[in-house]
Amino acid sequence: MFYPSFIILILFIILFTIEDLYYKKQIYRIFCEIIQNYKLPERIIKLKGIFSGLEELIIMLYDELSYKHYELREIAFRDPLTKFYNLLYLEEHLKDILSTFKNDLIPVFMIDIDKFKDINDNFGHIAGDHFLREFSSELRGVLVDSKNLIFRYGGDEFVIFFDEDFNKAKNLMEDLRKLLERKHLSIDGKKIKTTISIGGGVFKWEELKDIKEVLKKLDKKLYKAKEKRNTLYV
């Protein structure tokens, strides 16, 4: 059986050799618990005094690094303009995304804003960015009660995964298309009218594992919708 003082010595060595702050925090807690619960030599007990406040410092540093890691992750994976996740997140976290879905068949839709280039050309890119933010807000409003994940696929293209019935997902997409058909969005006080085209389909889990191939299929369907402009093609 190991003596507590020997265990403390080992923990003390480990504490200053490992780099991971999470494990440092756990080891220090064990270190303090042993000192509090065993009769130990005075020189060992003094170690706790030497490192008074170390636990709080470790926790603070760990929390700060965790938050910084979260911030960097958000910068890498979330589009700063629309606040939707980007294509990189979709490609790198596809398995995690699919694991949250309950249905075997998953409806996926791709949206494109019709003639968005004209908005940039006529009003400038800053105004175009403002328009995209307004559009994103409308998109969230229509889909707020549905089980979905929205990704910004490109400049003015978005991909949506639905964890529900295909017909319901299709109806929601049609509601969004009709809403924008009759609504004007604002740019610098000027009301701008635009429409969207939508291509969609339903895919099995196995198909979605090859996400690039799925996006190609959706792109073709979107092209069919854009031929007529402001239509939904499935």
Image (cartoon, rainbow, N blue to C red):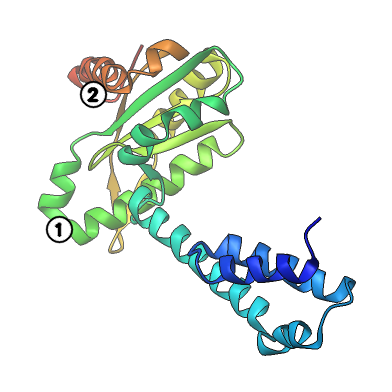
The spot of residue 176 in percent (x, y) is: 44, 32
Q: Is residue 133 left or right of residue 126?
A: right
In the rendered structure, are the residues bearing label 1 and label 2 in contact, judged by CB atoms less than 8 Å apart?
no
- Residue beneath label 1, please? 124
Q: Residue at x 66, y 71 (%)?
A: 9
- Residue beneath label 2, please? 229
Q: Nearer the viewer, residue 107 or 68?
A: 68
Q: Nearer the viewer, residue 163 or 118?
A: 163
Q: Residue at x 89, y 76 (%)?
A: 39
Query: Do we see residue 204 in this rendering?
Result: no
Q: Amino acid at mark 1?
A: Gly
Q: Amino acid at mark 2?
A: Arg
Badge 1 element: loop
Q: Residue at x 79, y 67 (%)?
A: 4
The spot of residue 46 in percent (x, y) is: 74, 88
Q: Is residue 37 left or right of residue 19?
A: right
Q: Is residue 215 left or right of residue 182?
A: left
Q: Nearer the viewer, residue 39 or 156?
A: 39
The spot of residue 45 in percent (x, y) is: 78, 84
Q: Residue at x 56, y 23 (%)?
A: 163
